[in-house]
Image (cartoon, grey):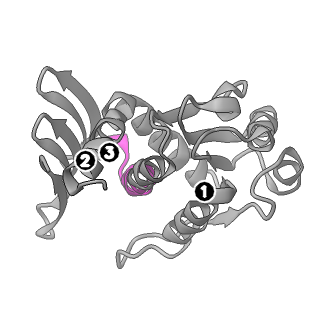
């Protein structure tokens, strides 16, 4: 029987491994915001265990849960993602977000390559060793969760695409003229991603250290704070 401590320990390494992908996630958020600003849409793809996450992320963008947050155009590719569906639905300003728990999906890899050829921004979330999805040519932003447990991979993917959603809105709302900056720092104590706007007093940061992981959003002007902390289990 698996104990609670063992269950958390199995997740600690792969989920905290997202720290190593901090720069990739930040760059993906900026690129996605630029596509939305140009009138593009999010096309989400994935099948099997990832199908539920595809539906989830589309709803996050189309029907944001935070009042006052801008709704953004998004749709789930009807066949789970293939070269043909990208050819049919994709436009050059769009973003293709592909998700697979193990990357063992040649059709999804072909969808990514067709998206690259069509000028779409491509973002892939996968697990295990990355499989065919990670081997697809020309993918702009790739995050591989190093775990063979599909449950752990999906949990990390949920964290990753919520960070994508949140920071895309930060980049859309703020411009360089308003004093927005993004930084990533790594040290022996852990990794930190932060986005700050001096004009609006808004700060979003993700930090990981030996004691756990923290994601927080703060607005000094509105007095709003949202935080998630994970310590040792």
Q: Nearer the viewer, mark 1 or mark 2?
A: 2
User: Which residue is located at x 39 percent, y 31 percent?
Assistant: 21
Residue 170: in magenta span: yes
First reached walking from the N terminus: tag 1 or tag 2: 2
Is residue 64 left or right of 108 when viewed as pictured?
A: left
Is residue 149 left or right of 222 when viewed as pictured?
A: right
In the rendered structure, which segment of residues is drawn in magenta? 160-177
Question: Residue 14, which numbered label?
Answer: none
Specify few, some or many for label 3: CA neighbours under 10 Å numbering under 14, 14-19, or 20 or more: some
- Mark 3 sits on what residue? 11
Q: Quadrant of residue 217?
A: bottom left
CA gap, disc 1 and disc 2: 25 Å
Disc 3 is placed on an element classified as: helix
> 34 or 46: nearer the eye?
46
Q: Nearer the viewer, mark 3 or mark 1?
A: 3
First reached walking from the N terminus: tag 3 or tag 2: 2
CA gap, disc 3 and disc 2: 9 Å
Q: Quadrant of residue 227?
A: bottom left
Residue 136: image location, x then y, percent: 71, 28
Disc 2 is placed on an element classified as: helix
First reached walking from the N terminus: tag 3 or tag 1: 3
Disc 1 is placed on an element classified as: helix
Q: Is residue 98 in view?
A: yes
Q: Nearer the viewer, mark 3 or mark 2?
A: 2
- Mark 1 sits on what residue? 50
Q: Is residue 200 in view?
A: no
User: Which residue is located at x 13 percent, y 65 percent?
Assistant: 221
Q: Given the current orientation, which residue lies at the most extreme top position? A: 188
Residue 150: image location, x then y, percent: 51, 49
Q: Are marks 3 and 1 in contact (CB under 8 Å)?
A: no
Residue 78: in magenta span: no
């Amino acid at each position: 029987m698996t104990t609670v401590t063992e269950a958390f320990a199995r997740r600690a390494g792969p989920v905290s491994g997202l720290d190593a992908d901090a720069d990739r996630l930040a760059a993906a958020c900026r690129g996605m915001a630029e596509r939305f600003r140009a009138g593009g849409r999010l096309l989400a793809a994935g099948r099997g265990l990832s199908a539920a996450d595809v539906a989830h992320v589309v709803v996050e963008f189309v029907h944001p849960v935070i009042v006052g947050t801008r709704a953004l155009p998004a749709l789930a590719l009807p066949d789970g993602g293939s070269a043909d569906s990208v050819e049919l639905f994709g436009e050059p300003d769009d973003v293709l977000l592909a998700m697979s728990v193990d990357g063992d999906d040649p059709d999804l890899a072909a969808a990514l390559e067709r998206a690259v050829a069509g000028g779409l921004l491509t973002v892939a979330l996968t697990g295990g060793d990355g499989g065919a999805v990670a081997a697809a040519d020309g993918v702009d932003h790739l995050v591989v969760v190093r775990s063979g447990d599909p449950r752990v991979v999906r949990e990390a993917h949920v964290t990753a695409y919520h960070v994508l959603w949140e920071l895309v809105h930060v980049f859309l709302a703020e411009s360089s003229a308003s004093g927005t900056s993004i930084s990533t720092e790594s040290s022996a104590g852990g990794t930190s991603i932060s986005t700050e706007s001096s004009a609006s007093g808004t700060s979003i940061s993700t930090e990981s250290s030996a004691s756990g992981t923290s994601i927080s959003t703060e607005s000094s002007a509105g007095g709003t704070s949202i935080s998630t902390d994970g310590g040792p289990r």
